[in-house]
């Protein structure tokens, strides 16, 4: 018996690696920073080369983040659409790194499967390369693991690792947040990559009509990449806190911007329009058997009157807000104009309130 008979096709791995090399090269944005190329035992990135092209930092701090796509992948497998989940993987990592004010430098991916199909793997990694290029990250390397008998054939898992950089004096850690600061919410592109263990229970027919398209395709819309518009905004105004709305929704993620300070995030209902996909999911949470346009209308009404359902939704999904900024009220107008003009609609969704006594920091929807 040889390795191929055991389930690992080395030649298919070589073919996948050939695809990866070209995809990696399309993300290189600074020849002086990247040393060597994909295919070695490790990726090399020169901080001196990067800093010489962007200006010196007094105290450069490296920032790292890692995440995966989760069970959203199951929908991609069923619909045989693999070219967007790589973008999700990048977004989940670089948006987190951005929360402290860091600029992503490079990205590594880890792709695992039961039986490797080089063409499918290339489509997934193409999404990674697109996400890297759109955020100024270099796809510096990665790993493809073929593990027969461990993963089902046709199933893949993907995780990513982002490394960024920020000058220590410019780290955004919530320490400058003040009572009365505004909370500016930036639109999401849909469900992003969270809550899919619940979504897959609610949406049983991926071909269900959703505004003229299969709902499964709507659910695969990739996570938005907030890096470039927010970094440009930081050059114009002071951003005092940032939150990436991922698993745990509003309740878990927004209070994290306060650091050690005792504040409450007060969110105003109706300050933005909740996208239809979340109304459909709300109806499914209430009644798993409902579907179609009627379910969307039911969900919209339920979110207004059912407090328990509303809390569940805001504690699971991003509800149309993928990223939140805390900033001085005097900067809201300029920030909104910048984001809107960059193609990232935003709304003033609430404000910061001082918590009473020793009350733990948290969130209130009113």
Image (cartoon, helix red, strand yellow):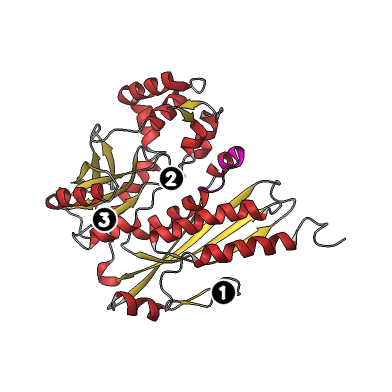
Between residue 267 and residue 82, name the one nearer to us.
Answer: 82
User: Looking at the picture, does residue 242 appear above or below residue 60?
Assistant: above
Number of marks drawn = 3
Among the 4 quarters of the image, the one containing residue 316: top left
Between residue 169 and residue 271, name the one nearer to us.
Answer: 271
Residue at 40% x, 78% y: name it.
Answer: 47
**Could you classify mark 1 by the number of other residues whose Cα lies within 10 Å: few (under 14), some (14-19), or many (20 or more)?**
few
- Percent of width and height locating residue 312: 40, 33
Q: Which residue is mark 2?
A: 247
**Could you classify mark 2 by the number of other residues whose Cα lies within 10 Å: few (under 14), some (14-19), or many (20 or more)?**
some
Q: Residue 96 vs residue 154: left or right?
A: left
Of pointers 2 and 3, the one earlier in the residue sequence: 3
Q: Which residue is mark 3?
A: 241
Residue at 22% x, 52% y: name it.
Answer: 338
Q: Are marks 2 and 3 in contact (CB under 8 Å)?
A: no
- Percent of width and height locating residue 97: 38, 60
Residue at 59% x, 56% y: name it.
Answer: 122
Q: Rounded to the nearest whole Å, what is the CA distance between mark 1 and mark 3?
A: 34 Å
Of pointers 1 and 3, the one earlier in the residue sequence: 1
Q: Secondary structure at mark 3?
A: strand
Can residue 13 be seen here? The reply is: yes
Among the 4 quarters of the image, the one containing residue 143: bottom right
Asked if residue 79 is among those painted magenta in the image, a careful observer would answer yes
Q: Secondary structure at mark 2?
A: loop
Asked if residue 133 is among those painted magenta in the image, a careful observer would answer no
Which numbered disc covers residue 42?
1
Between residue 317 and residue 28, name the one nearer to us.
Answer: 28
Which segment is the magenta one? 76-84
Which numbered disc covers residue 270?
none
């Amino acid at each position: 018996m040889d390795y191929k008979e055991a389930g690992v096709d080395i030649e298919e791995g070589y073919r996948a690696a050939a695809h990866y090399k070209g995809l990696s090269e399309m993300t290189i944005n600074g020849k002086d920073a990247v040393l060597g190329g994909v295919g070695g035992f490790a990726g090399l990135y020169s901080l001196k080369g990067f800093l010489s092209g962007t200006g010196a930092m007094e105290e450069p701090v490296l920032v790292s983040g890692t995440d995966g796509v989760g069970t959203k992948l199951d929908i991609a497998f069923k619909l045989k659409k693999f070219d967007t989940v790589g973008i999700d993987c990048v977004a989940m990592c670089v948006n987190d790194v951005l929360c402290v004010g860091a600029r992503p430098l490079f990205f590594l991916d880890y792709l695992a499967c039961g039986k490797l199909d080089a063409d499918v793997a290339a489509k997934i990694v193409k999404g990674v390369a697109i996400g890297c290029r759109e955020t100024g990250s270099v796809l510096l390397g990665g790993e493809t693991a073929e593990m027969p008998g461990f993963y089902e054939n046709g199933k893949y898992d993907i995780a990513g690792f982002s490394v960024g950089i920020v000058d220590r004096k410019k780290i955004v850690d919530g320490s400058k947040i003040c009572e009365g600061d505004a909370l500016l919410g930036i639109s999401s592109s849909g469900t992003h990559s969270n809550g899919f263990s619940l979504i897959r229970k609610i949406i049983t027919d991926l071909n269900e009509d959703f505004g003229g398209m299969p709902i499964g395709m709507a659910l695969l819309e990739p996570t938005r990449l907030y890096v470039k518009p927010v970094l440009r905004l930081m050059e114009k105004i002071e951003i005092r806190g940032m939150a990436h709305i991922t698993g745990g929704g509003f309740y878990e993620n927004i209070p994290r911007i306060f650091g050690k300070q005792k504040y409450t995030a007060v969110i105003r209902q109706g300050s933005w329009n909740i996208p239809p996909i979340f109304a459909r999911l709300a109806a499914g949470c209430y009644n798993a058997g409902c579907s179609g346009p009627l379910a969307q209308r039911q969900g919209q009404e339920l979110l207004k009157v059912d407090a328990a359902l509303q809390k569940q939704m805001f504690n699971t999904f991003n509800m149309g807000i993928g990223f939140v900024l805390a900033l001085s009220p005097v900067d809201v107008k300029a920030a909104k104009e910048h984001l809107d003009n960059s193609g990232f609609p935003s709304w003033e969704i609430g404000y910061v309130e001082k918590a009473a006594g020793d009350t733990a920091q948290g969130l209130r929807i009113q």
